[in-house]
Image: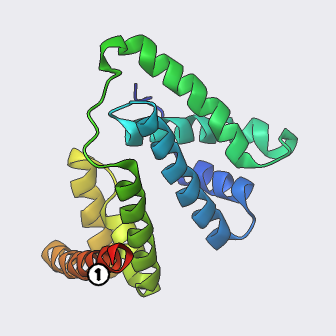
């Protein structure tokens, strides 16, 4: 289902500007929209909810030159329409993949996401950005991206791995504490 269209930095910047002129607010809106799209696809029984959410966002980014000047209203509503089409295409291509076993109750997953968000918000801005950057891409792109990230930070790739590991351990501990507090 993945589109072969590459998103340029310029296209992504225009997309963020369309979401909100304030870059930080645009980033927050983007993360919220992506999280909600993933949830929509997973609730509809799609095993590849993240991929479908990314495909939806890519399609919207492609339409930004047309949308930026003419679209009025909440951008999140536009995403839902595109997500509907992406879901219909997915179901047509994968009719047998509809039933999906539920690993955890939806409430548990939602609680885990909320705790993760709270813990991410507690991180120093540099560490938060590092974690968001570190876990992007797949396969060879991920390797190349991490090399570029290490070079930008002026550290070795192994030092980057160690730094990300330490931050991930603190996040894991924070999330576990949050879940215990919510349960108790």
Q: Quadrant of the N terminus?
A: top left
Which element type, helix, strand or loop, lies under badge 1?
helix
- In the image, taking residue 35 as reference, residue 50 lies left or right, namely left
Image quadrant of residue 124? bottom left
For image coordinates 27% across by 73% down, the residue present is 150
Q: Does residue 25 sit above or below 32 in this rendering?
A: below
- In the image, taking residue 94 as reference, residue 52 lies left or right, namely right
Asked whether the viewer can see residue 6, the reply is no
* Place of residue 44 in the rendered image (x, y in percent of width and height, measured from the top left): 45, 31
Q: Nearer the viewer, residue 50 or 61?
A: 50
Asked whether the viewer can see residue 65, the reply is yes
For image coordinates 50% across by 25% down, the residue present is 87
Q: Residues within 10 Å of mark 1 (few under 14, many from 20)?
A: some
For image coordinates 64% across by 40% down, the residue present is 79
Q: Does residue 75 sit above or below 46 in this rendering?
A: below
Q: Nearer the viewer, residue 61 or 9?
A: 61
The residue that disc 1 covers is 177
Q: Quadrant of the C terminus?
A: bottom left
Image quadrant of residue 112? bottom left
For image coordinates 49% across by 52% down, the residue present is 35
Q: Nearer the viewer, residue 124 or 130?
A: 124
What is the residue that sits farthest to the front in this orientation?
184
Image quadrant of residue 103? top left
* Place of residue 151 in the rendered image (x, y in percent of width and height, measured from the top left): 29, 73
* Place of residue 131 in the rendered image (x, y in percent of width and height, measured from the top left): 34, 71
* Place of residue 76 in the rendered image (x, y in percent of width and height, measured from the top left): 68, 47
């Amino acid at each position: 289902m993945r589109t072969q269209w590459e998103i340029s930095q310029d296209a992504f910047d225009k997309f963020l500007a369309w979401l909100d002129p304030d870059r930080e607010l645009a980033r927050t809106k983007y993360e919220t929209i992506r999280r909600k799209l993933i949830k929509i696809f997973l609730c509809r029984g799609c095993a590849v909810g993240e991929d479908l959410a990314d495909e939806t966002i890519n399609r919207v980014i492609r339409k930004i030159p047309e949308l930026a000047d003419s679209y009025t209203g909440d951008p999140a509503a536009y995403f839902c329409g595109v997500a509907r089409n992406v879901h219909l295409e997915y179901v047509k291509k994968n009719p047998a993949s509809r039933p999906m076993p539920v690993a955890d109750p939806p409430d548990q997953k939602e609680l885990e996401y909320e705790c993760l968000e709270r813990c991410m918000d507690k991180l120093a801005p540099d560490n938060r950005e590092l974690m968001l950057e570190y876990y992007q891409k797949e396969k060879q792109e991920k390797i190349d991206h991490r090399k570029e990230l290490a070079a930008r930070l002026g550290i070795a790739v192994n030092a980057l791995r160690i730094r990300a590991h330490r931050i991930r351990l603190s996040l894991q501990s924070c999330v576990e504490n949050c879940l215990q507090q919510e349960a108790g």
